[in-house]
Structures are given as C-alpha cells and as structure tokens.
Image (cartoon, rainbow, N blue to C red):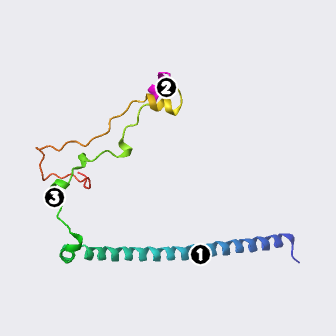
Amino acid sequence: MLKTFDLVLIGVMTATAAVTYTIKHRAELKLEEVHRLEAEIKLEKDTIDLLKADWALQSQPNRLERLVKAYNEELKLQPTESTALVHAKELPMLKSEVPVPDVTEAKAKGAPDTAKGAQATAKVQPIPMPAPRGEAEDADQIETGSVEE
C-alpha cells in the first residue's frame, strides 16, 4: 500500500500546488490593477491635453480683446502702466529668508532661561526694505525670476 514517504510527498505536492495557485492568482490581480492604473493615467493625460487646448482657445488675444470691448463699461479696465511693474530685487524678503535672532548670546550673558527673557534680550533685526530703483538701469532688463540664466 502507500508508505509514509509517499503520503509525505503527496502532501508536499498538494501544498506546493496551493502556493503556486495563490501566487498566480495574486499576480493576475496585480496585473489587472496595473492595467486599470494605466487606463486612468491615459484618461488623465487626455484630460490635461484637452484642458490645455481649451486654455489656448480661451486665452487668445483676439478673443480677450473682443471681450474687453464688449464688457468695457462693466469692467472699466485700463492698461497697466509701466510704473506698476517692479523688479524682483524690489520685493521684500520671504519669511524663510529673514535672519533669526541669536538667542545664545542672551543665555551667555546670564539672562533668564524663559522665553520672555530671551526675547527681551535678543537683538532687534531691522525690517528688510526694497532696494531703490536706480535711474541708470536699462529699462529693457526686466527681472522676473522665471528664467534661470
């Protein structure tokens, strides 16, 4: 009849068949998910292309000029004067660029370790001001910060 070794081999074969089937099933599920995600990505790319085309149509200068003329009384739009434009160096500093006061000096001088004591003894930093616009600058040199040189 069947020996013990044969029963062990039958059990091992059954277990490996079950594991193989489980792995195959998981792989098929992942492949379906990949196909679904690829379809979603294609749909999103197509939507982006459509929106870009729509934006190009909506922002055509001729169309905008017609709209300005049609709604001029309600909107009362006026051209932007050249004095309303500023250079990047005339803008104030970002909060991330503002220097942090040095509180280690206050602790070294024997000031109290509380937050009030550290704030009271810290040096006051001057408020950054925009640089004055010079007369010698070339008017054609506009710095927008959008193009790296």
Disc 2, SS: helix
Please tell me whether mark 3 or mark 1 is closer to you in this view.
3
Given the current orientation, which residue lies at the most extreme top position? 109
* Residue 39 percent location from the top left of the image: 46, 77
Q: Mark 3 highlights which residue?
A: 81
**Which mark sits nearer the N-terminus, 2 or 3?**
3
Q: Do residues under tags 2 and 3 come within 8 Å of each other at their CB atoms?
A: no
Disc 3, SS: loop
| C-alpha separation, residue under disc 3 versus residue under disc 1 | 62 Å
Task: Residue at 15%, 51% (x, y): give it.
Answer: 141
**10 on left or right of 126:** right
| C-alpha separation, residue under disc 2 versus residue under disc 3 | 52 Å
Three-letter code for the amino acid on which mark 2 is drawn: Lys
Given the current orientation, which residue lies at the most extreme front position? 73
Q: Mark 1 highlights which residue?
A: 29
| C-alpha separation, residue under disc 1 versus residue under disc 2 | 62 Å
Task: Residue at 42%, 77% (x, y): give it.
Answer: 43
Three-letter code for the amino acid on which mark 1 is drawn: Leu
**Which mark sits nearer the N-terminus, 3 or 1?**
1
* Residue 85 percent location from the top left of the image: 20, 54
Badge 3 density bin: few <14, some 14–19, many ≥20, Cα 10 Å = few
